[in-house]
Amino acid sequence: MKRREFLTRAAGGGAAALAASSFPKPAVAQGVREWRMVTTWPENFPGLGTGANLLAKFITEGSEGRLKVKVFGAGKIVPAFEAMDAVGNGTVEMGHGAPYYWKGKANASQFLSGIPFGFTAQEQNAWYQYGGGQQLADRIYKELGCKFFVSGNTGCQMGGWFNKEINSAADLKGLKMRIPGLGGEVVKAAGGTPVNLAGGDIAPALQSGAIDATEWVGPYNDLAFGFYKNAKYYYYPGWHEPSGVLDNFVNLKAWESLPADLKALVEAANAAANLIVLDEFVARNNDSLEVLRSKHNVQLRAFPNDALNELGRLSGEVLIDQAKKDKLSQETFDSILAFRKTAIAWSNLSERAYLAARALPFKYAG
Ligand code: CA
């Protein structure tokens, strides 16, 4: 890093820099870079925090220590939702979270997460790699002073935890529910009150009655937070987040200061982490669902088709409204809509048809 750039950075940063003042600034000596990655997740949290750890490990070890990345969980340097500011203004070099957490700064960012009734995880990855998603995300994050990487996916999420049955979209009326991003806007359109809370704040809010319901991720993560202690029904499917994208954002100047080989390494490390995080969710959700059912007697409920149909209709209206807010939102939504159309055509003949075939009542080995 150039000396002048270092001085500018050391002087900037505002409140986040003050909060971080007890941490020494990273050393840059003899081509060795020490980067700090702040996350929106509790440290080492299953799948999410561990995904950030995996990314840091790939970059640090893959560069043989030329680019050392150290992970700081939510609240360690800055609170969860200040991660983007801290990276954008150069207080730290890297962040790890979810795109819709930044919708207050860039409306279009919420279209980069899984959108209601949008892509499956595989379709989402295909859009990022081959459907123009990466380029759009880079333009959106550039406005925040960052370079974007997709860095993990939760797979299809669960619909959430409720203390009453949801038989129609109207049953969401008056409900105060933790649900971020576009899903939250749909709950609002259905007459509910969406709130966004960082992961670590959800369980206490559910326990105290500050919120009536919540979604988080799926069995693996929801078991870890113990939501079953304070909610009766666990609904599926996660219509609002059929794929949950995790983002890795890098301060644009820090990114541009990297030599080509380290840039390629960061890109490859994110591509690897993106898939391995999804693998972890799929594997652990299977086991955790069993624990929730058999050990904690959680009552599983499917949203009835009538409710899903209405939520789908409302989602369409909400997405159109949200896309109108600015040019980049509209462009991103249009790109997703076009890709979704072709994705559905192929998925109907492949995954969807196969899953139906696998569910037929034939006798199978074991
Ligand atoms: Ca979620």
Image: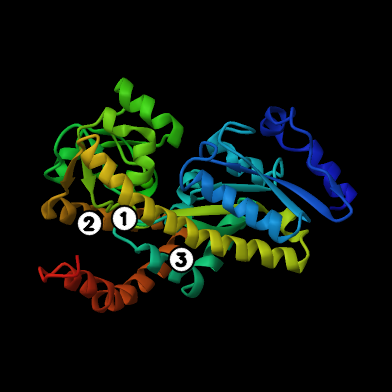
Amino acid carrying label 1: it is Pro
The answer to whether residue 130 is above or below residue 190 is below
Marks 1 and 3, how far apart in space? 17 Å
Residue ID for mark 1:
116
**Secondary element at image label 1:** loop
Q: Quadrant of residue 245?
A: bottom left
Query: In the image, residue 242 lies at what x, y percent?
Result: 33, 57
Nearest the viewer among 363 and 334 is 363
**Secondary element at image label 2:** helix
Nearest the viewer among 182 and 326 is 182
Mark 3 Cα-neighbour bin, 10 Å: few <14, some 14–19, many ≥20:
some
Query: In the image, residue 174 lies at what x, y percent?
Result: 21, 32
Looking at the image, residue 163 sits to the left or right of residue 347; the answer is left
Residue 210 seen: no
Label of residue 85 in the image:
none
**Secondary element at image label 3:** helix
Residue 337 seen: yes
Residue ID for mark 3:
331
Residue ID for mark 2:
312
Amino acid carrying label 2: it is Gly
